[in-house]
């Protein structure tokens, strides 16, 4: 099993990254404020950056250390990667399957089965853990509706129908999301999912966390030799990592959404960690990002038993394992792609 390495998160807009031998140097106003050995890193993520030296970017590319540049609000800006991994036969097979309506639909169904199953699991876990604090009757009703949609997803005969079921399931799931916020209700109230830009603190956290997880999915797919831009459910669009977004779907609820809820309910973030722009956009401020990313790094190191492999792995390796299983299914080593089904 691949070893989970560290991710370096740069949260200040004043930091410049450069290279010194085998180390990444973090500078502020041309003064060194930090230094880390590159062999301990698997990725560097910057959020509103002063810049990075060409020498460092080349070194990272040669050592398969991904560099992802996000805006201060968490939106993807650019990514530096090295040569493509894996053989051309795997990618040719991926492209043929993506161009086949039948084969693409089969894989898309499995992604959606994972997504809706996990949304339902999050709700069922809340019913079990907080029975006396929640409207469990309403939650149970939504859970039953998601179960019905899950059954219809398995029988969807077109991508359009499948996307309709996905939208209906997401609407029902998020209709109860505010219930799952048990602390800081006044500061963190959720009405509906909004983005580009997020208009409240909960949506700001969701969007930022989805961006972090998408970057992990892109890196995982590249590592196993797949093209993260050639998706099955998400359509091709210049600059959009469609396959990474496919893979992200099944991980949203158990990985990102539960992390957001945990940070709010355990008061790991507060209202002082956010800023609001004139257009109404809400996002984590610099201090908030630093705090949030520290907790995110700890989350990645937590262990779970993978539902398909039945092995203990870190949460940070889940995207890699799913990418590996996807590559095996595309090569024909598996009968079908086994989605991540969290319980």
Image (tube, rainbow, N blue to C red):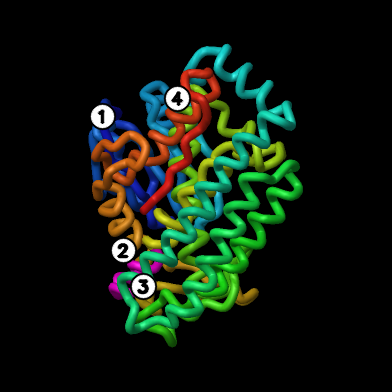
Sequence order check: which comes first, mark 3 or mark 2? 3
Q: Residue at x 38, y 31 (%)?
A: 65
- On residue 264, the disc is 3
Q: Which residue is mark 1?
A: 39
- Circles 2 and 4 in contact, beta carbons < 8 Å: no
Which of the 4 quarters of the picture holds residue 6?
top left
Q: Which residue is mark 4?
A: 224
Q: Position of residue 129 (x, y in %)?
A: 30, 71
Q: Residue at x 30, y 75 (%)?
A: 267
Sequence order check: which comes first, mark 1 or mark 2? 1
Q: Position of residue 168 (x, y in %)?
A: 66, 62
Crowd class of label 1 (few under 14; some 14 to 19; many from 20; radius 10 Å): few
- Distance (Cα) linking label 3 and label 1: 34 Å
Q: Residue 209, relative to residue 143: is it above or below?
A: above
Crowd class of label 4 (few under 14; some 14 to 19; many from 20; radius 10 Å): many
Q: Position of residue 335 (x, y in %)?
A: 51, 25
């Amino acid at each position: 099993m691949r070893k989970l390495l560290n991710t370096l998160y740069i949260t200040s807009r004043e930091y410049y990254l450069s290279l010194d031998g085998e180390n990444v140097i973090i500078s502020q106003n041309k003064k060194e404020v930090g230094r880390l050995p590159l062999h301990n890193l698997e990725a560097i993520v910057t959020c509103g950056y002063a810049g990075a030296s060409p020498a460092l970017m080349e070194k990272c590319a040669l050592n398969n250390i991904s560099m992802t540049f996000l805006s201060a609000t968490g939106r993807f800006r650019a990514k530096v990667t090295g040569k493509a991994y894996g053989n051309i036969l795997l990618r040719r097979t991926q492209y043929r399957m993506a161009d086949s309506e039948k084969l693409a639909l089969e894989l898309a169904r499995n992604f959606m089965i994972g997504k809706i199953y996990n949304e339902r699991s999050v709700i069922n876990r809340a019913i079990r853990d907080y029975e006396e604090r929640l409207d469990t009757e309403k939650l149970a009703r939504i859970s039953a509706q998601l179960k019905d949609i899950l059954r219809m997803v398995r029988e969807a005969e077109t991508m359009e129908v499948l996307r309709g079921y996905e939208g209906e399931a997401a609407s029902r799931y998020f209709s109860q999301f505010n219930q799952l916020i048990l602390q800081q209700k006044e500061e963190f109230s959720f009405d509906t999912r909004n983005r580009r830009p997020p208009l409240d603190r909960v949506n700001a956290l969701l969007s930022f966390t989805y961006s972090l997880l998408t970057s992990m999915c892109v890196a995982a797919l590249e590592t196993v030799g797949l093209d993260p831009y050639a998706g099955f459910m998400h359509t091709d669009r210049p600059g959009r990592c469609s396959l990474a977004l496919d893979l992200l779907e099944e991980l949203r609820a158990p990985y990102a959404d539960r992390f957001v809820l945990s940070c709010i309910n355990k008061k790991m973030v507060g209202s002082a960690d956010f800023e609001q722009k004139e257009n109404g956009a809400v996002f984590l401020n610099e201090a908030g990002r630093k705090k949030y990313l520290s907790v995110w790094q700890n989350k990645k190191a937590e262990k779970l038993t993978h539902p398909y492999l039945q092995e203990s792995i870190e949460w940070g390796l889940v995207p890699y394992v799913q990418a590996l299983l996807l590559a095996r299914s595309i090569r024909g080593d598996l009968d079908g792609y086994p989605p991540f089904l969290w319980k």
